Image (spheres, rainbow, N blue to C red):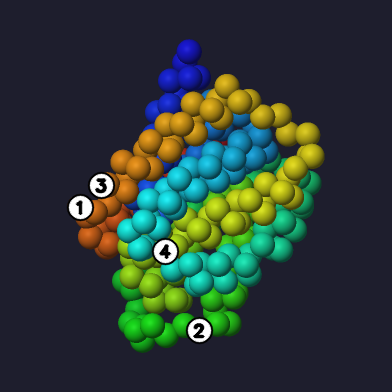
Amino acid sequence: MTALVLALVAGAVVGLALGGLGGGGSVLAVPALTYLIGMEPAEAITTSLIIVTLTSVTALAGHARDGNVAWRTGLLFAAAGIVPAMLAGTAAGSLPQAGLTLAFAAVAGLAALRMLRPASATAGGEVRPVEAGAAGAGLGAVTGLLGVGGGFLAVPALTRVLSLPMRRAVGTSLLVITVNSLAALGARAGTGVHLDWAVIAPFTAAAILGAWDGKRHARRLSGNTLQRVFAYALLAVAAFMLADAFV
């Protein structure tokens, strides 16, 4: 019963992040599955990918109805990350658990600090293909290696590199998350990782409901406020995981 309650609460928080911020779900899901539910990091990473994929598809539908998804941009951005996601996902199985934890914390912390920096001026609508391709490939590699959907990296990349408005970047990032997560899951298929559906099912259900609620709350906040809330949540997660790794 305790595991069920924890799964429901954690799922709701993950859904709120995905629906309202366009990312942050898996970077919150993996620590929740590891520290609250008690899963091993490898099991938590694969489980997180399943939860975040299903939740992202649901949240994506809502943002698409509101016209907040740049489909062509998102698909091109995601396409650059498919192969890196699959290669990194295959390689992740040979890495030590402590190394994965440290890498996860470092990526979350760096993404948070980047989002807290003042945005630099960009030419309206200017797209830099080389930078966009590099960002998409790097995002895919991080998704495959650490089991994160990548929204916490996709949102700043879409706003800064591709000059999308914050709300449109949030919706588009959900498309990128879905594609990258499916590619990473494909690479992990058949690896023999145990999946606890008694946790996955309630976690996902709560996350889907939370995503719809997060989308509703996002309409009341400015893009900068959303970004800062997102960044501070990531910093807290990164600090906790670093402390745990070194204790």
Identify the secondary structure beneath mark 1: loop
Which label's residue is closer to the chain start, 3 or 2? 2
Tell me where residue 68 appears, x and y as whole percent.
36, 63
Tell me: 33 left or right of 194.
left
**Residue 220 bears which disc, if any?**
1
Task: Give the structural element (helix, strand or loop) at label 4.
Answer: loop
> How many numbered dots are placed on residues in this image?
4
| Residue 171 visible (yes or no) | yes
CA separation in Å, label 3 and label 1: 6 Å
Q: Along the line of sight, which residue is nearer the eye, 97 or 3?
A: 3
Indicate left or right for 180 with 127 as reference. right
Q: Which residue is rendered at x = 63% and y = 25% of the image? A: 196
Quadrant location of the C terminus in the rendered image: top right
Q: Amino acid at mark 2?
A: Arg
Q: CA distance from mark 1 to mark 2?
A: 31 Å
Q: Amino acid at mark 1?
A: Arg
**Residue drawn where x is 66% and y is 34% of the image:** 43
Please give the label number shown on residue 198: none
Could you tell which of marks 4 and 1 lies nearer the N-terminus? 4
Give the class, few, some or many, for how many residues have Cα within 10 Å of label 1's Cα (few <14, many ≥20): few
Question: Farthest top residue?
Answer: 1
Locate residue 48 relative to residue 236 in the image: left or right: right
Which type of secondary structure does the marked residue at label 3 adopt? helix
Circles 3, 1 touching at the beta carbon (< 8 Å): yes
- Per the image, the residue denoted by label 3 is 217
Mark 4 or mark 3, whichever is nearer to me? 4
Q: CA distance from mark 4 to mark 1?
A: 19 Å
Instruction: Tell me the SS state at disc 2.
Output: loop
Which numbered circle lies on residue 69? 4
Instruction: Mark 4 vs mark 1: give the one in front.
Output: 4
- The mark found on residue 128 in the picture is 2
Q: CA distance from mark 2 to mark 4?
A: 19 Å
